[in-house]
Image (cartoon, rainbow, N blue to C red):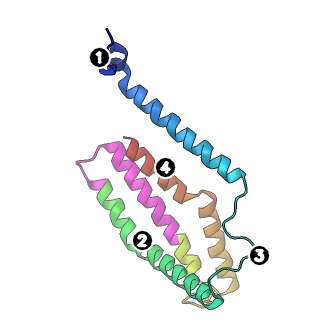
């Protein structure tokens, strides 16, 4: 007599582990396939074919994307401190979740501060005229922030929250 998969004692004991292993091997297989495709050096755009974008359109798109990035990071200076406060004071969350959410948003806030400092003194598009020493100081602060890769640390905090 054949038993169905759900009636097996092994399945009842280890169904979560088996499911996780199947998902893991599936994702590893997809990753290996993508790495194989990447190793083939396939290119959609080659040097011999000109892009359908004019130089003026390219400059407009670059300007719009830079403006959108500037606005997003500058607005995060307002939202991330609030997110830190509300995550830290929310009693309905467990302590590890509160700690990780607060750390995530605090890291984002520190990154936004460093980015805003260097943004404020951009030579061509910054809102302020800054001395070379001030520009070097802000660049040093930004390089220290980039050295610790606060955005990646924030993503790790979010990952840990998601896994909890």
Q: Residue at x 69, y 81 (%)?
A: 133
SS type, badge 1: helix
From which residue to which does the magenta span run?
88-113
Mark nearer the N terminus (2 vs 3)? 3
Return the disc, 2 or 1, that comes first in the chain's sequence: 1
Q: Position of residue 37 (x, y in %)?
A: 66, 51
Does residue 122 appear left or right of residue 65 in this picture? right
Whole-Å distance between the Cαs marked 2 and 1? Answer: 53 Å
N-term mark: 2 or 4: 2
Determine which of the numbered discs, if any, sits on residue 76 in the image.
2
Where on the picture, by quarter, is residue 54?
bottom right
The part of the image, by quadrant, that contains residue 118 is bottom right
Q: Is residue 87 magenta?
A: no
Q: Main secondary structure of the magenta part?
A: helix
Residue that protrudes farthest toward the front in the picture: 1
Please tell me in which quadrant of the rendered image residue 145 appears. Answer: bottom right
Q: Which mark is residue 39?
A: none
Q: Residue furthest top?
A: 1
In three-dimensional space, the C-alpha distance between marks 4 and 1, rounded to whole angstroms, equals 39 Å
Can you identify the residue that label 4 sits on? Answer: 156
């Amino acid at each position: 007599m054949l038993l169905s998969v759900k009636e097996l004692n092994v399945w009842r004991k280890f169904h979560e582990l088996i499911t996780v292993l199947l998902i893991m091997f599936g994702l590893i297989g997809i990753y290996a396939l993508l790495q194989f495709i990447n190793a083939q050096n396939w290119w959609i755009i080659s040097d011999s074919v000109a892009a359908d974008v004019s130089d003026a359109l390219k400059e407009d798109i670059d300007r719009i994307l830079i403006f959108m990035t500037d606005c997003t990071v500058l607005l995060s200076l307002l939202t991330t401190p609030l997110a830190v406060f509300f995550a830290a004071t929310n009693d309905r969350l467990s302590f590890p979740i509160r700690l990780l959410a607060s750390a995530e948003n605090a890291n984002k806030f520190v990154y936004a501060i460093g980015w805003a400092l260097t943004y404020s003194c951009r030579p061509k598009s910054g809102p302020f005229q800054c001395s070379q020493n001030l520009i070097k100081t802000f660049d040093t602060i930004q390089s220290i922030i980039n050295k610790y890769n606060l955005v990646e640390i924030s993503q790790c905090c979010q990952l840990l929250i998601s896994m909890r």
